[in-house]
Image (cartoon, rainbow, N blue to C red):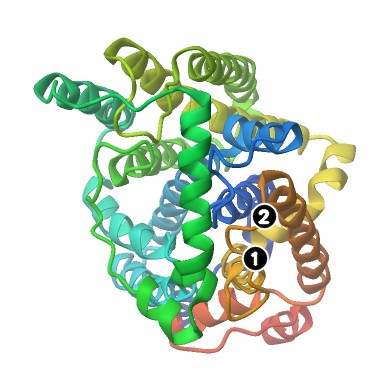
Amino acid sequence: MSSTNETVARSQSPVDPRQRIEAVDMVRGFALFGVLLVNMFNFGSGGFFWNEPIDELAWSVKQFFFETKSWRLFSFLFGLSFALQLIRARERESKFAPIYLRRLIILFVFGATHALIYDGDILMLFAELGLLLVLFRKVPLRLLLVLSVGLLAVFPIGRVTTSLLEPTQTAQTTDYSVRLEEATAEIEEDRRTHVYAVGSVREVMADNAFLENPFARPLGPESSLARFAMFLLGFYVGRRRIFQDIPKHMQLIRRVFWWGLPIGLVSMGAERILNATTGYEVFREQPATLLPQLFGDVLFTYGSSLLALGYAAGITLLAQHHRGRRLLAPLGAVGRLALTVYLSGSVMFGMLFYGFAFGNAFWLGPAAVTGYAILFFAIQIVFSVWWANRFRFGPMEWLWRALTYLKFPSMRPQEQSHGKG
């Protein structure tokens, strides 16, 4: 009887940090930098107004290497995590659904609170899509792969279909002087009136408050369907146990790196050339002509996904070497504290931008924002390394686990060891 009770207790306990997969944490840490950087551009730093060479370079680097790729990677890791949890529950012969449902409910609550600080919250959407993912837990592996690739196609096919059905749409001007004049007027208006620039804490929170429809904006490059496609891909990889046994799958990981990274980079380069020559922009609803729109959307959609997978494969390969592990160890610490890092990043850039704090919304260009993002992430790295060397869980990770399992997990490694003895 005591043996049975111990088995049940283990099955309903949080994952021990020693059971974590180092490479996955390192990939997650890398993705978090991209998420922080891209989020910080949403405070007036992405407009045509910022046309100095250094700003154009910073914008291009963000767009080329991180825009959408970071969220693709983060979504992929969520699906992978789901597979790991499901496999762990099956191996321990424990009930999966109740614990998983509580995790998602708590994640949604965290996201709803976070959304008051930053209207680009992703936690609520991840919780909603995570619930949908349960329906696919028994889908055959090959079908998961087909569904993932197919869902990514919804954006380019759907947008070109919409353009064909609504041919009366007027193209936006590509004239430099006109666009600069429009951008200047827009940013000056935002500086005077936008709630982020002039609002109080209460006004900003009221403006940010929302409940995300998981299927909102189905034809956007960062739509819920695109993110769910990466969920499914991560779930596929997890069920194949690729990260659970990296040495066994080294050939596949190398193939993903040597094919995914170059094709992704070439696709992004072609998309940038298309932008420079035709005025195509993936986030603009009415591109100049139909063919550049379709070609650019396909390049961006699949190129971003391949580049994200190339990043994951490259980090995983590097982590198999001693020097590589030492180099990537700080990212691994960040990855272990992913929820804490994600939420604290919003607090930091909120203080930088909002009018009730330092008031830099719509005043910082891409180069300055990139510099601040690097500074903020460096602070998070230092904190994460310090914390991870002393505690089993990050602050928010500990709270998430405590609420999920309805008990307080020990924070210090020696407490865990003492409990086992």
Reading the image, the residue beneath label 1 is 360
Q: Position of residue 57 (x, y in %)?
A: 71, 32
Near mark 2 (Cα within 10 A), the count class, few <14, some 14-19 or many ≥20, is: some
Q: Amino acid at mark 2?
A: Leu
Q: Is residue 219 above or below residue 360?
A: above
Q: Residue at x 42, y 59 (%)?
A: 122
The foreground one among 319 and 149 is: 149
Snapshot quadrant of residue 146:
top left
Q: Is residue 25 above or below residue 6?
A: above
Q: Position of residue 337 (x, y in %)?
A: 65, 66
Spatial separation of the CA atoms under disc 1 and disc 2: 6 Å
Could you tell me which quadrant the C terminus lies in? Answer: bottom right
Can residue 316 be seen here? The reply is no
Snapshot quadrant of residue 247:
top right
Reading the image, the residue beneath label 2 is 364
Near mark 1 (Cα within 10 A), the count class, few <14, some 14-19 or many ≥20, is: some
The foreground one among 144 and 93 is: 144
Could you tell me which quadrant the N terminus lies in? Answer: bottom left
